[in-house]
Image (tube, rainbow, N blue to C red):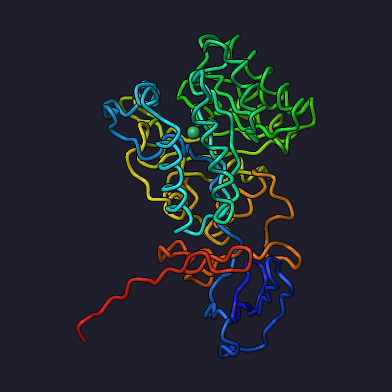
Amino acid sequence: MNVINARLRGRPGLFRIELNGAAIAAIVPQPDVVAPGAADDLDAAQNLVVPPFVEPHIHLDATLTAGEPEWNMSGTLFEGIERWAQRKETTTHDDIKARAKKTIDMLVDHGIQHVRTHVDVTEPGLVALKAMVEVREDVRHLVDLQIVAFPQEGIESYPNGRALMTEAIAIGADVVGGIPHFENTREQGVASLKFLMDLAERSGCLVDVHCDETDDPQSRFLEVLAEEARVRQMGPRVTASHTVAMGSYDNAYCSKLFRLLKRSGINFVSCPTESIHLQGRFDNYPKRRGVTRVAEIDRAGMNVCFGQDSIVDPWYPLGNGNILRILEAGLHICHMLGYEDLQRCLDLITENSARTLNLGERYGIEVGRPANLLLLSAPDDYEMVRSQGHALVSIRHGEVLMRRTPAQVHRRG
Ligand code: FE2
């Protein structure tokens, strides 16, 4: 299969991308627009061809459960955790698999082929984790799935929390998670971070911590995570998710913190729609945005990307799998609608996210890499966001996985 009349990000002109089986065989400059020749030519119509979108932060065990058995009436993160604890009592292996697969279909429909899901392991039977390990195999033809062992109710604060984390990694989780700001005390939060970093170092797993997901400016576990990563030289394998307290840190502390963050080399995930919904709930006016400093992290040369976090769960009632919706909202919320940001905004849901997931040479439009790519509906990043564009075709392992027909408007002449 060949993709013709393709634009590539950061390279002028048009290209023909030749796919040979499951790999990209050649990328050939085209002097002019060409008409489709062979029957299996796909015409990009002078629009962008990019590697697949990435979902770096979602909770597939919780999706599609909002209102079961009760709605989150306060809209706070902590009521969400309470509502989830109720729903968790009725989850079953089959229930989790069915909802996760339905959600993965929603992600695939929007061009996502790489997913990192957090899975709650604060449950003695590890039912959700065992189900998700099966899902990871069942959906290999659709997405590459990374599973985070995520201690929703704490490591130190939950009975046998450490043992459950260790068992989850032994069963097959890819990534070690954490939630230090939820532990009962600051000391427990710090201890949980040292424990989870030890576990990751021992097992060779990646790390992704829900870190400082609170408006409390005194929540300062990010500095502990970054220092642990720096000392162990694990930074590129470590991700700090949310870090929304950073939006409430004062600038003097943040300028010191950024020195450490840069030296640590860790990655950041922001979930802007979820955070602006859940945070700021204890404020009168002026009301904080409750998101991390995405633009500042990016300007400082560090790696940051956007995720959806939830789709119709106790924390967030909306969502449809479309990461472009998160990108558009995030650019607004994070004050990133400047010209230069718009020129390269797709980085926040492609290249930066792939780096967070440590995808390496398994990702990108390069000869020899997997034949996984998207045909988009616009010629550049700016127009893709402005026009609220879509992934029109998703190709995986050299075959069409999803094809979208855009809606047509008929206007009276
Ligand atoms: Fe999350």
Q: Residue at x 51, y 18 (%)?
A: 124
395 or 230, nearer to the observer: 395
Image side of residue 4 versus residue 313, left or right: right
Q: Where does residue 178 sit, x and y in percent of width and height?
A: 58, 24
Left or right: 72, with 298 as reference point: left
Question: At which x and y percent is residue 31?
Answer: 67, 87
Nearest the camera: 96 or 326? 96
Instruction: Identify the residue at image location x=57%, y=15%.
Output: 161
- Tell me: residue 89, above or below residue 399: above
Above or below for 316 versus 344: above
Hey, which quadrant is residue 347 in on the image? bottom right
Task: Residue at 44% x, 32% y: name it.
Answer: 290
286 on left or right of 292: left
Q: Position of residue 155 (x, y in %)?
A: 57, 16
* Rendering coords of residue 39 (x, y %): 56, 86
Asked whether 313 or 377 is in front, the reply is 313
Residue at figure coordinates x 76%, y 27% from the top left: 201
Query: What is the residue that sits farthest to the front in this orientation?
Result: 94
Quick one: quadrant of the C terminus? bottom left
Quadrant for the N terminus in the image: bottom right
Residue 348 appears in the rendering: no
Residue 41 seen anywhere in this rendered image of the structure:
yes
* Count of numbered labels shown in the rendering: 0
